């Protein structure tokens, strides 16, 4: 019986993880949850799973949840809040496995603390490795901790790598759907609306990651994450547009062989793979994870257009630079995406903002998690200044 802490329990990955726990109650026990600001979901999860500890974003939300639980006669659940609360959730002594699924750098401190506490990590938060990959990997090596990717692309690579040694790998290929605008004329990009960008053709995800998919920044983050997870330079992490989204990634070996991982587009599958590793757990029809081979009648692959998707180019450049460039890439993107969703900058204002921030960023590498967080704050401030200049038309 694996005992789980789920960071980001009210998000899509959190819900999918709980669905896996529902299907395999003899294998997985939910011990602690970090639920952010969604108090209604947090309350429902407490009623269903009775975790030992749950963390909310703020003290006020924690107090409200505690009151609602007491009204139901539930007094056995410890309710905590803030960064310290999330760290507490992730480092409970009885926890074996931590699912890191908090979007952005908000989950960084808790994930790093869990690694230092010797917990196995199911990594669905790509920003952790983008912003602090060197530090997290060093801590994982020091504490002999496994980092198991939950992102479908990296999970697919992890599965394919079981077919050969690291020395036998020539390069890896991350597939991308291309988002909703892979065929949109470039001349129309400046007028793309948030409503259009939020209509992803394949996956149902949160707002930021959906916009990042539309700009292909999400794939750029995945390139950086893959470089760090699989110890490869950026030149050996390739991307390909694959609109069917049935091949999740491929590994090309030195002898010319290519292994591909194919499955349904359901996040429960990579979550189950990570939770069960190194085993594979049999699923039944009720899990609806069986793949229909007839859907393979057409498989399209094409090279991404870096003129159409400059965010991907910026990510490759940041991967080569490393250090603070990767931190700034993520921070500036988060600020720019929020400004786009609020209607303050156009769609192409996102890469323009990120590129301007990267030009202001030093090449220094962070020596601690505090350095990462400070560099993140500085990049966010730079992004806000760049956006303000865009809005006023002031020179850059």
Image (cartoon, rainbow, N blue to C red):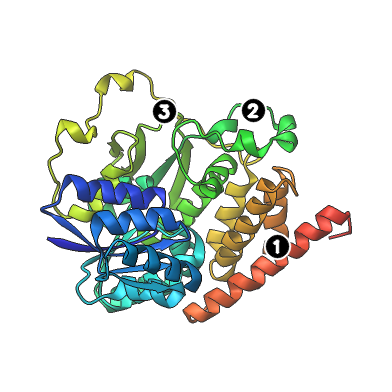
Percent position of residue 66, x then y = 37, 69
Q: Secondary structure at mark 2?
A: loop
Whether residue 303 can be seen here: yes
To which residue does mark 3 refer?
244
Q: Is residue 388 left or right of residue 106?
A: right
Q: Is residue 201 left or right of residue 115?
A: right
**Marks 2 and 1, how far apart in space?**
27 Å
Q: Residue at x 30, y 33 (%)?
A: 264
To which residue does mark 2 refer?
184
Of the residues tagged 2 and 1, which is closer to the observer? 1
Disc nearer the start of the sequence (3/1): 3
Relative to 135, is 188 above or below? above
Of the residues tagged 3 and 1, which is closer to the observer? 1
Within-10-Å neighbours for mark 1: few <14, some 14–19, many 20+? many
Residue closest to the eye, 23 or 360? 23
If the image is split into quadrants, where does the N terminus sit? Answer: bottom left
Disc 2 and disc 1 in contact, CB within 8 angstroms: no
Disc nearer the start of the sequence (2/1): 2
Q: Residue at x 38, y 74 (%)?
A: 80
Q: Residue at x 77, y 61 (%)?
A: 386
Q: Secondary structure at mark 1?
A: helix
Within-10-Å neighbours for mark 3: few <14, some 14–19, many 20+? many
Percent position of residue 178, x then y = 52, 35
Disc nearer the start of the sequence (3/2): 2
| Residue 51 disc label | none
Q: Is residue 185 left or right of residue 147?
A: right
To which residue does mark 1 refer?
383
Residue closest to the eye, 137 or 113? 113
Percent position of residue 350, x then y = 68, 49
């Amino acid at each position: 019986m694996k005992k789980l802490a789920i960071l980001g329990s009210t998000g899509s990955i959190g819900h999918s993880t709980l669905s896996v726990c529902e299907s395999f109650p003899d294998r997985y026990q939910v011990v602690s949850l970090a639920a952010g600001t969604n108090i209604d979901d947090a309350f429902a999860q407490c009623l269903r799973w009775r975790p030992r500890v749950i963390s909310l974003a703020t003290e006020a939300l924690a107090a409200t949840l505690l009151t609602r639980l007491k009204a139901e006669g539930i007094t056995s659940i410890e309710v905590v809040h803030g960064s310290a609360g999330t760290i507490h959730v992730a480092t409970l002594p009885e926890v074996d496995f931590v699912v890191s699924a908090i979007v952005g750098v908000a989950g960084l401190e808790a994930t790093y603390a869990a690694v230092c506490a010797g917990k196995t990590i199911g990594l669905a938060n790509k920003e952790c490795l983008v912003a602090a990959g060197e530090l997290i990997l060093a801590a994982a090596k020091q504490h002999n901790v496994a980092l198991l990717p939950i992102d479908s692309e990296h999970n697919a690579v992890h599965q394919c790598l079981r077919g050969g040694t690291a020395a036998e790998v020539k390069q890896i290929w991350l597939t991308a759907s291309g988002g909703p605008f892979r065929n949109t004329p470039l001349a129309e990009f400046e007028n793309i609306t948030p409503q259009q960008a939020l209509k992803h053709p394949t996956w149902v995800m949160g707002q930021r990651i959906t916009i990042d998919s539309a700009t292909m920044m999400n794939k750029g983050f995945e390139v950086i994450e893959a470089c760090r997870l699989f110890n490869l330079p950026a030149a050996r992490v390739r991307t390909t547009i694959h609109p069917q989204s049935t091949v999740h990634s491929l590994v090309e070996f030195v002898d010319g062989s290519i292994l591909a991982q194919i499955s349904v587009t359901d996040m429960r599958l990579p979550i189950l793979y990570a939770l069960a590793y190194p085993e594979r757990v049999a699923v039944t029809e009720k899990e609806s994870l069986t793949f229909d081979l007839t859907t393979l009648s057409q498989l399209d692959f094409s090279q991404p257009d870096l003129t159409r998707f400059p965010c991907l180019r910026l990510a490759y450049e940041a991967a080569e630079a490393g250090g603070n460039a990767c931190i700034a890439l993520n921070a500036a993107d988060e600020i720019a995406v929020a400004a786009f969703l609020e209607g303050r900058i156009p769609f192409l204002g996102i890469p323009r903002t990120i590129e301007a921030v990267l030009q202001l960023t030093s090449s220094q590498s962070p020596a601690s998690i505090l350095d990462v967080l400070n560099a993140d704050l500085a990049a966010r401030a730079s992004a806000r200044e760049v956006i303000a200049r865009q809005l006023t038309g002031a020179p850059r």
